[in-house]
Image (cartoon, coloured by chain):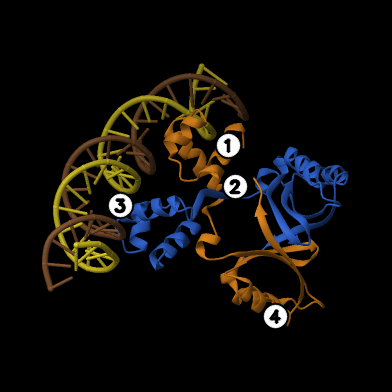
Chain colours: A orange, B blue, C yellow, D brown
DNA sequence: GCAACTCCTTTCAAAAATAAAGTAAAACAG
DNA sequence: CTGTTTTACTTTATTTTTGAAAGGAGTTGC
């Protein structure tokens, strides 16, 4: 992991569909050399995958929220299983230490679906809800 | 936005470096047709960008955390400006309603840097810290 | 001094992207 | 109902990129 690798990570973070030729030019390498570096970063597990940024609202999801989940007792499985059944709403599930046991990043078509989700979630755990108003930068 | 577009979003979410030819095959279209659909999704703002998933630990960041920021009073700017100066640590800044005014997703080389950051942050705001233990799925 | 690596470049064949032309079906106005 | 426009696609042909292979320069270790 030298400076060139860091630059490659930065460039691919900004645009992962760039050609290896273009990437090479940006880090002062030829296409094949850049491609070889990227392949190595994949093999080393530094690059875990290639994804897209999606506008959730344009996909019909107008409510974006974070949920801090608090589970009483030691048996988390029923709650985790429930969450898995609602994976369509959930972008990320983090096991955390601090404000609760889990942090969910999720999005819903609207408040109706959110409300229904919270109602069901409440059978398994307590929660604190934070609605996303804006994403900065 | 029909079913084919949704499938395209799903496929690109899983692997945004797939070729348009391969993407086309997966959604029963030719390469050029798939590319045209993707171009339209970009123009419509549904696809906002192409990115990579990075293993933060392999980049030397062993502490991954969420910070709920609570600002007293109405002048958020000093705190926001401070946060901007620390952008190297910060992956996302969300304006929220609920547990605080802002939610920061951030990562630090270690607890030393986290501690220093919190010390400085405390000049501008209160916070609640959640350390990420694991990412599920 | 001389392997054995590593990291790169150059070259070239294969694959993919892209542009252009053509087609068929749907939407729509008269 | 009919002719026109639009949309979404396929096919074809050209350009560009990828990826494999060969080779060279600079380290490293013996």
Quarter of the image with the C terminus of chain B in it: bottom right
- Distance from disc 4 to disc 3, alpha carbons, whole Å, reads 46 Å
* Tag in front: 3 or 1: 3
Q: Earlier in the sequence, mark 1 or mark 4?
A: 1
The chain holding disc 3 is B
For label 4, the crowd category at 10 Å Cα-Cα, with few meaning under 14, some 14 to 19 and many 20 or more, is: few
Q: Nearer the viewer, residue A2 or A120?
A: A120
- Give the percent coordinates (x, y) of residue A81: 65, 77
Question: Mark number for residue A119?
Answer: 4
Quarter of the image with the N terminus of chain B in it: bottom left
As drawn, C4 above or below B112? above
Residue under label 1, please give it. Answer: A5
* Tag in front: 4 or 3: 4
Check if mark 3 and mark 2 are on a common chain.
no
Question: Mark number for residue B32?
Answer: 3
- Give the percent coordinates (x, y) of residue B122: 87, 47
Q: Residue at x 57, y 69 (%)?
A: A109
- Distance from disc 3 to disc 2, alpha carbons, whole Å, reads 32 Å
């Amino acid at each position: 992991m030298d400076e060139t690798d860091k630059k490659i990570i930065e460039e691919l973070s900004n645009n992962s569909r760039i050609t290896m030729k273009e990437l090479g030019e940006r880090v002062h390498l030829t296409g094949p050399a850049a491609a070889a570096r990227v392949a190595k970063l994949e093999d080393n597990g530094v690059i875990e995958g290639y994804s897209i940024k999606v506008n959730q609202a344009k996909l019909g999801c107008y409510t974006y929220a974070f949920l801090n989940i608090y589970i009483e007792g030691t048996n988390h499985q029923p709650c985790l299983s429930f969450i898995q059944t609602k994976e369509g709403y959930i972008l990320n599930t983090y096991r955390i230490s601090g404000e609760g046991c889990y942090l969910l990043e999720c999005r819903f078509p609207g408040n109706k679906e959110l409300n229904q989700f919270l109602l069901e979630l409440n059978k398994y755990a307590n929660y604190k809800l934070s609605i996303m108003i804006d994403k900065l930068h």
